[in-house]
Image: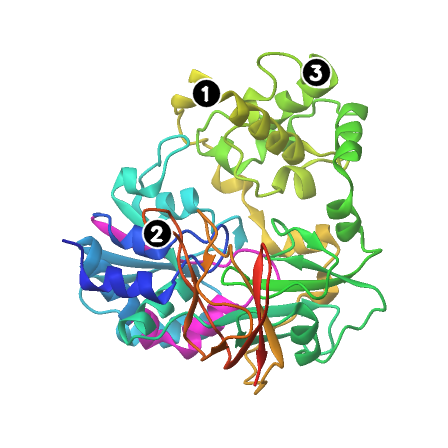
Amino acid sequence: MSHPIVQKVRAAGVVGAGGAGFPTHVKLNAKADTFLVNSVECEPLLYKDKELMRLQAARMVEGLRLAMDATGAARGIIALKAKAHDAIAALEPHMMGPLSLHPLDNYYPAGDEYCVVYECTGRVIPAGGIPLQVGCVVSNTESLVNVALADQGLPVVQKALTVAGEVANPSTFIVPVGISAREVIHMAGGATVDDPVLIDGGPMMGPCITDLDAPVTKTSAGWVVLSRQHKLAMRKLAPEHQRVRIAKASCDQCVMCTELCPRYLMGYAIEPHKVMRMVGFAGEQHDQWGRHGLLCCECNICEYYACPEDLTPRSMCVRAKGAWSKKGKWPPHLEGLGRIHPMREARRVPVSRLVHRLGLTQYDVPAPFRDFAYEPPRVRLMLKQHLGAPAVPMVAEGQKVAMAQVVADVPEGKLGAPIHASIDGRVARIDETSIWIERK
């Protein structure tokens, strides 16, 4: 029988508060000897994890203890940046018994799950595998805050996120799930450019979106507001056919993309320069197309930092993963694992240099938490805010709902999590992707 907290977490709709949004109740139903909290927050300009740890240290640690109890973990490790002095000071009084802090240097991508597991435990996850295969469960800061809230019967109806870049007051907020990016930007004093675009989730891995009415979801980590003419925005908005054409154009096989690849440096069978070679020579029709890029973690170091010619190795690795997934079987060479590269530590990418290379130096300022009281007139709740099946509406148009009420849930036996109303109001509209609620 599963631990009582597992059902509470499932009922509260807790998912990974960044990335794909893996349902947390599934993680807590596993067994491991170590529970790791990934609080590294290595994406430039984001501060929401650091601010949550500073302000809600006791609650996060309570969530960690509940998670350890559920998984049977004998120790809990919180990985975070050594420079997060305020967060460390807030957490240290709670580090008793089997709990410990593991400070990391300020490099990118220190928060990569494979990297965090290796740095904290010395264990290497099998190629294409998950932390559970080496006795670890990994969750993030906000997810564990939400685990503690779920234990009190409180579902996920709010989201912490940072707003940075071209805004008057870069800040971190806790906002209702479902409000628009436009509203959050207004809370940060408004955009300081006429035609802003948003990088959702961090400048390295986040996609660039142009719709300012895009809603906050459970996985929103932060928005970096930029001018549409900023070089980074233009690169992210480039169409796929242009990325392929650029990849074919002028790669001189300098191998810098491979030599700085974090997964290559950990001994995994990935060599982006060979993917680029096949784009220009053998082509995508070759039966082994892109096999050297299938273990790409999509961190973008190769594309935004390593390549001296601004080419697109990461994009081609992602393209290759899509092609091989259609085949249903990956090549056997991925199963092997080499040794940790002797130059791994020397080739870490300092975040300060990365920020400069991205053209974001002027935006590299703190984004402190601001308690902004805001009651949105409406919210848009996406039905797919998690990995797995979309949630199915449990309400009808015109129906009155109360904040924290379940308005959508996933079918029995499917991977996913329920969605809860984040305001009191009336269901104004239901479409294929979302539920709109208007305040009374």
Q: Secondary structure at mark 2?
A: strand
Name above or below for residue 19 compared with residue 172. Answer: above
On whether residue 438 falls in the magenta region, the answer is no
* In-front residue for pair 187/183: 183
How far across and down, in percent of the image, does residue 376 sit?
Answer: 61, 81
Quadrant in the rendering for residue 255: top right
Q: Residue at x 47, y 23 (%)?
A: 328
Q: Amino acid at mark 1?
A: Lys
Which of these two is toward me, 19 or 385?
385
Residue 242 placement (x, y as % from top left): 80, 34
Instruction: Tell me where residue 297 appears, x and y as whole percent.
Output: 52, 39
Q: Label 2 to label 1, Cα distance in Å?
A: 27 Å
Please report the residue visible at 72 percent of the width from the left and 50 percent of the height from the top.
357
User: Could you say which is closer to the camera, residue 305 or residue 275?
Assistant: 275
CA separation, marks 3 and 2?
A: 38 Å
Which residue is denoted by mark 3 in the rendering?
283
For label 2, the residue is 138
Q: Position of residue 218 (x, y in %)?
A: 49, 63
**What kind of element bears circle 1?**
loop
Image height of 183 relative to 34, above or below: below
Q: Which residue is mark 1?
A: 329
Q: Residue furthest left?
A: 1
